[in-house]
Image: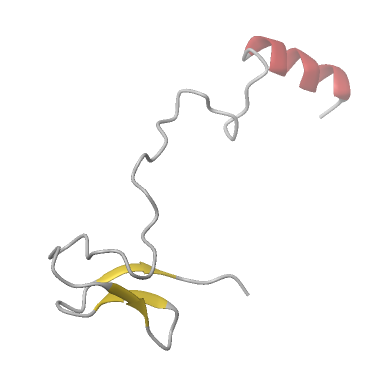
């Protein structure tokens, strides 16, 4: 696509692309951290296991998983 077509397309769509969506709702829930209470049962505490997953010590539910390397 040429530069002129791209600029005209931006003007038609108010300069917004699919990855710039100001109307998209953002998550307001805080990110779970180690030591927080479990969001599932509320009685256990969250701790990382060997696979970098935040797991509840009481109900064994996974609150968050994944890690950056």
Residue at left 15%, top 63%? 42
How has the structure been colored for display? secondary structure
Residue at left 52%, top 24%? 22
Residue at left 13%, top 68%? 43
Quarter of the image where one finds residue 3: top right
Which residue is at the far right? Answer: 3
Q: Is residue 45 left or right of residue 18?
A: left
Q: Quadrant of the N terminus?
A: top right
User: Is 13 or 26 nearer to us in this picture?
Assistant: 26
Q: Is residue 28 left or right of residue 67?
A: left
Above or below, comparing residue 28 to residue 31 in the picture: above
User: Is 25 or 43 nearer to us in this picture?
Assistant: 43
Residue at left 39%, top 76%? 53
Above or below, comparing residue 42 to residue 12 in the picture: below
Q: Is residue 2 left or right of residue 10?
A: right
User: Is 30 or 65 nearer to us in this picture?
Assistant: 30
Q: Please state the horizontal and vertical placement of residue 29, each as a whole percent of the image.
A: 33, 45
Which residue is at the far front? Answer: 35
Q: Please state the horizontal and vertical placement of residue 38, each as a whole percent of the image.
A: 22, 65
Q: Please state the horizontal and vertical placement of residue 52, each as a whole percent of the image.
A: 45, 79
Q: Quadrant of the C terminus?
A: bottom right
State the count of labels. Answer: 0
């Amino acid at each position: 696509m040429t530069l002129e077509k791209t600029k005209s397309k931006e003007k038609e769509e108010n300069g917004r692309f699919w990855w710039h969506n100001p109307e998209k709702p953002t998550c307001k829930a805080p990110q779970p951290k180690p030591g927080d209470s479990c969001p599932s049962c509320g009685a256990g505490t969250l701790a990382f296991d060997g696979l970098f997953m935040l797991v509840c010590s009481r109900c064994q539910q996974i609150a968050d998983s994944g890690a950056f390397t």
